[in-house]
Image (cartoon, rainbow, N blue to C red):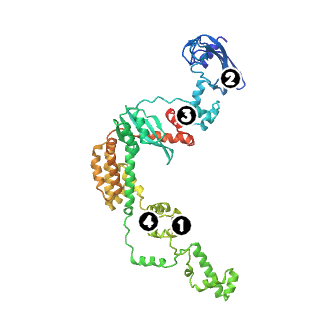
Amino acid sequence: MNEVRPRLDELLFSSVEGVSVESVKVTGTIVRVEARTTAMRAACPGCGCWSGRIHGSYLRIPRDLPAAGKFVVVSLRVRRFVCAEDSCPRKTFAEQVAGLTRRFGRRTERLRSALVSVGLALAGRAGARMTDVFGSPVSRNTLLRLITSLPDPPIATPRVVGVDEYAQRKGRIYGTVLVDVETRRPIDLLPDREADTLAAWLAERPGIEIVCRDRAPFYAEGATRGAPQALQVADRWHLWHNLGEAAEKCVYRHRGCLRPVPAPPDEPQEQEEAEPTASSPWPTGHRFAERTRAKHATIHALLTAGHSKRSAARQLGMTLNTILRFSRATTPEELFTGQWQSRATKLDAYKPYLDQRWQEGCTNAWKLWEEIKEQGYPDGYGNVRNYVSRSLRGKPQPVGPRPPSARAVTRWILTHPDALPEGNRLQLKAVLANCPELTALAEHVRSFAHMLTHLQGHHLPTWIEAATATTELPSLRHFAQHLERDLDAVIAGLTQPWNSGVVEGHVNRIKMLKRQMFGRAGFALLRKRVLLAT
């Protein structure tokens, strides 16, 4: 046993000083380690004075990390010392073993550290399931309490800080994440995205030299007030994204140029196509029309066979007035009147536009509803869907390939010409040949892309002046005018190598952490996980 004890001390308490193992007992699924402290004196937690006068001893039984699938319990005998300082309010105090115990702790420090690591990585429910796997089961609330009790990491003043928003509750509550762009580590989380909150945080750290942000007005105001000495840099990704949105609006405005002009049809074809339009106002397959046609044919067949109108009414279970009305109509189309035929609706004013868009190739009823909604249509999607399914589905579309969508053309314009596939390049060339406005848009986009990729921000005022002069592209003109409101930060963003890419990465990481916590975690717990789980 004298040879085994040093090995046990080295194996079980290699990083702990002042502990001696006396015995190890295995009973069933529990390993009990008998140990005692060997320090000659201890420091009082109240006054800090060292004392070697022993008042008494008692057993502490903290749980330790499992071994070989068995629970490990440390039966540790610790002592109470008498404080040597008469003025100290503590008369006696219990010794604590650094790296092994803490006051009122029922787990060893290494088990506590393992549980904290699981809680930071997996949060409550998933973390509790993981603790069952490695043999130290605890509840999800215990893991969350351990995370909440952790101290905040020390926050050093960064030289380059990135600022962006994240959603605590999308569309309602937003917060702010701040990241050290040089070390790529999160520094702090703020509970809102107000300018006052950001300004107060920046004012406490006067060593900040560069602030990377998007073009949100509250962040621009907060950075100006809180760090007037810092250089503000607008993020290039947001600039390119805003330009893409403006370009898509311009392409959508000229969507008529996306389809080649069809050749005029011959006159005989027009006459042939005019005949079916003069036929029945209801297409074949309409439930009301088919039912009316069937009743009309049945009633006229009975009357032709010699039955009286009263006899036909008895046989068909109809009233005499209904039989009389059907008998007077020579064709079933004469009966197509009433509330389901030719009744004025709120959609009537928009039907010519829907027919035109259908001929242009837009067959998505939801997209059509969104378009007329922007024009002032007050009703919901159902009426548009019914009109498309009953009236437009049967209409022939222009013969030829389907024109590209506005989003596809925008993507081609935003893509570098060398990276564009040959087929898309030819399609884009054909589209630009039909529309000089889109040709001008492509030139502006490519000049902005060259300025962005080569960090030539000094060309931005010239580009803004040229884009503002394009009256045929109002969305591009508005984008250029908005750049003038934050011109210094935009020029710095197109000149300096700094950007907010690392901040966007941490925003995505916050989304993942919130999903792990099912969106129920408060700001304090979320802040702990973001700052500590790195």
The residue labelled by disc 1 is 386
Badge nearest the viewer, 4 or 3:
3
Please name the amino acid that badge 4 sits on.
Arg
Badge nearest the viewer, 2 or 3:
3
Q: Residue at point 39% right, 59% down?
A: 252
The residue labelled by disc 4 is 357
Above-or-below relation of 522 to 400: above
Please name the amino acid that badge 2 sits on.
Val
User: SS at mark 1?
Assistant: helix
Please name the amino acid that badge 1 sits on.
Asn
Q: Position of residue 446 (x, y in %)?
A: 32, 50
Can I make out residue 122 in this image? yes
User: SS at mark 3?
Assistant: helix
Badge nearest the viewer, 2 or 1:
1
User: SS at mark 2?
Assistant: strand
Alpha-carbon distance for marks 2 and 1?
Answer: 73 Å
Outermost residue toward the bottom?
306
Q: Residue at point 40% right, 52% down?
A: 245
Q: Earlier in the sequence, mark 2 or mark 3?
A: 2
Q: Position of residue 522 (x, y in %)?
A: 55, 39
